[in-house]
Image (cartoon, grey):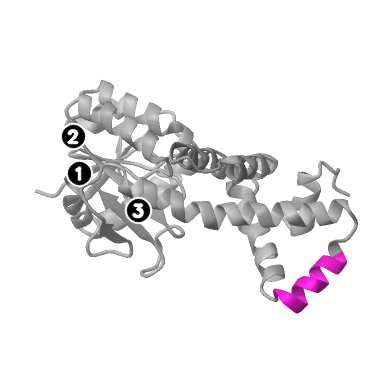
């Protein structure tokens, strides 16, 4: 009998991960109560099995797949543990190893087996774009849930926190440097040197102007999620005795862009910089 995976949050990323599990042979289900029309539309299009409540969903499922904003990861685990779920709990959220260990304790206390996860890449729509790193005692079993599919699942060992640690290190650079680039561009705008700075970048760092434009369009709408992720990364640095201030500042940078959370279209760079500088749009 195929595993039934309870996908707790069929968001933009989660729905594609669930679709990959479905393609690999698992049943994928979700709880419809209280969810938005956008979520319902995504889950219905993906042909996931709809349940009324989370309790009903978990009673028929052998695996839980948690993909949600970092700030909701622990409370989601607590909700699942309260139902007495004793299957495999795969937490694929962008959280620190400290948070991952706490989540493991929550779900294992209820009898479940914890598998740590970290997603690198965009929504898993095409093969070769997205990796799901997994670690823990049953990481190999979790890899099987996505094989074969467009999502490359990779087992990196038995540790309950290794996948989260890898995700923190990876995102510390990719999303951290993106926040720095936006902050530098906003500073240049404020000091009225944006044009000469962009000209110098064209001469000495030719790829940077293109990256700035792309970063503004791609990251603004997701900045509300990245804020929490930056705090998780900062915590990871702190625990290891390393300076954490940069990523706390990156969290502040992304917080400035929270207004784009529900934007239908990606904003232009000029609008993003005006938002950061709290300048009213023309």
Residue 280: name its quadrant: top right
Query: Where residue 17 is drawn, which disc sits there?
Result: 3
Counting from the top left corner in percent of width and height, residue 7 is at 32, 42
Secondary structure predominantly adopted by residues drawn in magenta: helix
Counting from the top left corner in percent of width and height, residue 61 is at 20, 37
Q: CA distance from mark 2 to mark 1?
A: 7 Å
Q: Is residue 262 left or right of residue 182?
A: left
Are there few (<14), some (14-19), or many (20+) residues within 10 Å of tag 3? many
Q: Is residue 98 left or right of residue 122?
A: left
Regarding residue 15, the answer to whether it shows in the image is: no
- Residue 45 part of the magenta segment: no
Earlier along the polypeptide chain: callout 2 or callout 1? 1
Earlier along the polypeptide chain: callout 1 or callout 3? 1
Question: In front: 29, or 243?
Answer: 243
Question: In front: 53, or 149?
Answer: 149
Residue at image position (41%, 67%) is 129
Query: Where residue 215 is drawn, which disc sits there?
Result: none
- Which residue position holds label 2? 60
Question: In front: 134, or 200?
Answer: 200
Which segment is the magenta one? 195-205
Earlier along the polypeptide chain: callout 3 or callout 2? 3
Residue at image position (35%, 53%) is 17
Up/down of 233 relative to 270, above or below: above
Q: Is residue 182 left or right of residue 26?
A: right
Q: Are marks 2 and 1 in contact (CB under 8 Å)?
A: yes
Question: Which residue is situated farthest in the left direction here?
Answer: 1
- Local SS, label 3: helix
Q: CA distance from mark 1 to mark 3?
A: 14 Å
- Residue 203 part of the magenta segment: yes
Circle nearer the viewer, 1 or 3: 3
Q: How many marks?
A: 3
């Amino acid at each position: 009998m195929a595993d039934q995976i309870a996908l707790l949050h069929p968001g933009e990323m989660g729905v594609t991960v669930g679709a990959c599990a479905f393609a690999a042979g698992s049943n994928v289900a979700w709880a419809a109560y209280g969810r938005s029309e956008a979520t319902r539309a995504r889950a219905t299009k993906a042909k996931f099995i709809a349940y009324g409540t989370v309790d009903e969903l978990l009673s028929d499922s052998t695996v839980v797949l948690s993909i949600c904003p970092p700030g909701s990861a622990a409370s989601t685990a607590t909700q699942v543990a309260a139902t007495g779920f004793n299957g495999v709990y795969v937490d694929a959220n962008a959280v620190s190893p400290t948070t991952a260990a706490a989540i493991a304790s929550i779900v294992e206390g209820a009898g479940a087996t914890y598998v740590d996860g970290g997603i690198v890449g965009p929504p898993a729509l095409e093969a070769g774009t997205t990796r799901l790193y997994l670690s823990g005692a049953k990481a190999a079993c979790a890899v099987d849930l996505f094989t074969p599919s467009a999502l490359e699942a990779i087992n990196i060992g038995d540790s309950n926190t290794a996948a989260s640690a890898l995700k923190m290190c990876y995102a510390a650079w990719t999303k951290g440097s993106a926040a720095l680039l936006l902050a530098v561009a906003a500073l240049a705008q404020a000091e009225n040197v944006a044009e000469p700075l962009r000209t110098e970048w064209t001469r000495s760092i030719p790829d940077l102007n293109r990256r700035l434009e792309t970063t503004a369009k791609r990251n603004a709408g997701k900045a509300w999620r990245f804020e929490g992720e930056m705090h998780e990364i900062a915590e990871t640095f702190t625990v290891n005795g390393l300076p954490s201030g940069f990523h706390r500042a990156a969290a502040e940078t992304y917080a400035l862009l929270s207004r784009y959370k529900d934007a239908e279209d990606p904003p232009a760079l000029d609008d993003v910089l005006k938002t950061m500088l709290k300048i009213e749009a023309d």
